[in-house]
Amino acid sequence: MKDRVTPNHFQELTTIYEVSKVLSSSMDLEHTLNDVLKTLESHLHISPSMIVLRMNEEIVGVIAATGLSVAEIERGRYRLGEGMIGKIMRAGMPIVIPDVSQEPAFLHRAFEPEISQRLHAFVGVPIKVGYECIGVLAIYRSERHKGVSFRSDVRLLQMIANLVGQTVNLHQGISAERNRLLQEKHRLQKELQKRYSIKNVIGNSRAMQAVFADVHQAAPGKATVLLRGESGTGKEVIARAIHYLSPRRDKAFVSLNCAALPESILESELFGHERGAFTGATQERKGRFELADGGTLFLDEIGDISPAFQAKLLRVLQEREFERVGGTQTRRVNVRIIAATNRNLEEAVSKGEFRADLYYRINVVSIFLPPLRERREDIPALIEHFLARYNAENQRKLTLTPEALQTMVSCYWPGNVRELENCVERTATMMRGDIIRNLDVPCQRNQCLSMALRPLEGSHPIVTMKLSSGMSVPPHAAPDVEGQVTDASGAGDGEGSLPLSERDRLIQAMDRCGWVQAKAARLLGTTTRKLGYALNKHGIEVKKL
């Protein structure tokens, strides 16, 4: 005969509804299951109760419980087939014991003796995922609840156990995916650490060994590091090495080229912005400082930021706090700063182009990276490395003759390691055979765009144009107001060399400065606007590196 509809049915329906809300409220499985049992206790006055889940192939244990102490929960371990819990797990069927004192198979393992004496009935149902039993939902009734229908208990508990099983399955799937992602993260971090390890940076010369010693000394600390050196000397590689040798290696390494962005965009990139802060800001965005929280922020070309932005950056470096663009909430971050520049900051400070207080803030630990021409003994190993990488990526077997190697070693390399890498790749790409001979090197065929670069006073190169008479065009030869390049006499590297056209001069200047127009304009002694006119006139497309 069917059960009559009673007020208890509505109470049970309400209980199931509340349980379903609890199961979807948190990603903490143990906390969620405890809240489920508390809901049963609150609505149906059921206590003690427990949820037991499979811990391995042979053992199940109490994961959540009401009315049990911590010690009692710890004792709640059962083998498959052992006690009532073990039998439910093995059979996958509900078990009802009207009087546990009359059941010799009931173990009373989880309860203290005084609590066991108050227990009267036991109802346990399996928690299943598909056909597999993964646990047990069990409740205990005292003598004052003898009038409760066990059939109603089983029906209610089976519905709740079904919901619990789906939730446990979902959590286990998420946990497995999280573990997989963590393992992948650790694997990638190890690969990055190996890739950017100092051991993988090619530099057997005395100058580079001194750099490596400074890196190992500075990496474990928290001090701001300033990397000094010409463009292309590997400042970002060294910055990453410092990060992966530091205690912050498991956090983010975030980099930003300060010279590549105008001030308005640079502020948003570093500090982030709120929704509606400016046209196009359709949603809030974290800046580089927030993304690097707990890790390292690498600010490349910091010497090229404007005086106005220097003041904004100074406060963040001092206080480690900022507001997003368009926001008022002050945000604090724990970030280690590594800055880099190829400028003479001391000279810039003396001229008023760079704030002295910002200079003192970033110039805590200075590491100077030598130009490639000052460590020529490293060039053969670098060429071998770049050529081997090219061969692996392009399924080639290119080799270099001793004469060609000597030619490359003797070059000036104003673009340093970056230029050497480009030269090797360009030469290898244009080779039809498998042997690179001396005549195949671009500078031997007047095809080297960097031949006109010569050292400036100090350590930076400058564009100088040699005429056929041996005289040099002064460094101020640059595009005029209309974008014309004056003194277009030639740019060879000795007598009889071919002159450089206006277009070639612009290309070599842009290439030297990493295709950053502001830097190329300073190199040519002109303004960014004039340089832009000249680039448009000659149809030179600005590369995005």
Image: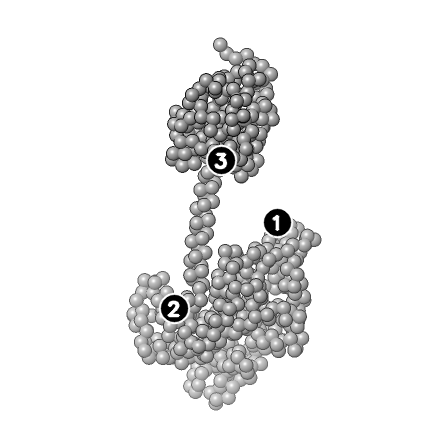
Secondary structure under tag 3 reads helix
Q: Nearer the viewer, residue 495 or 70?
A: 70
Residue type at tag 1: Gln
In space, the residues marked 3 and 1 are separated at their CA atoms by 49 Å
Q: Which residue is mark 1?
A: 283
Callout 3 environment at 10 Å: few (<14), some (14 to 19), or many (20+)? few
Residue at the spot x=47%, y=41% of the render? 175
Secondary structure under tag 1 reads loop
Q: Which residue is mark 3?
A: 74
Callout 1 environment at 10 Å: few (<14), some (14 to 19), or many (20+)? few
Mark whose residue sits in front, 3 or 2: 3
Q: Nearer the viewer, residue 256 or 535?
A: 256
Percent position of residue 540, x then y: 51, 68
Percent position of residue 543, x then y: 50, 65
Mark whose residue sits in front, 3 or 1: 3
Residue type at tag 3: Glu
Q: Residue furthest front?
A: 113
Percent position of residue 65, x then y: 53, 31
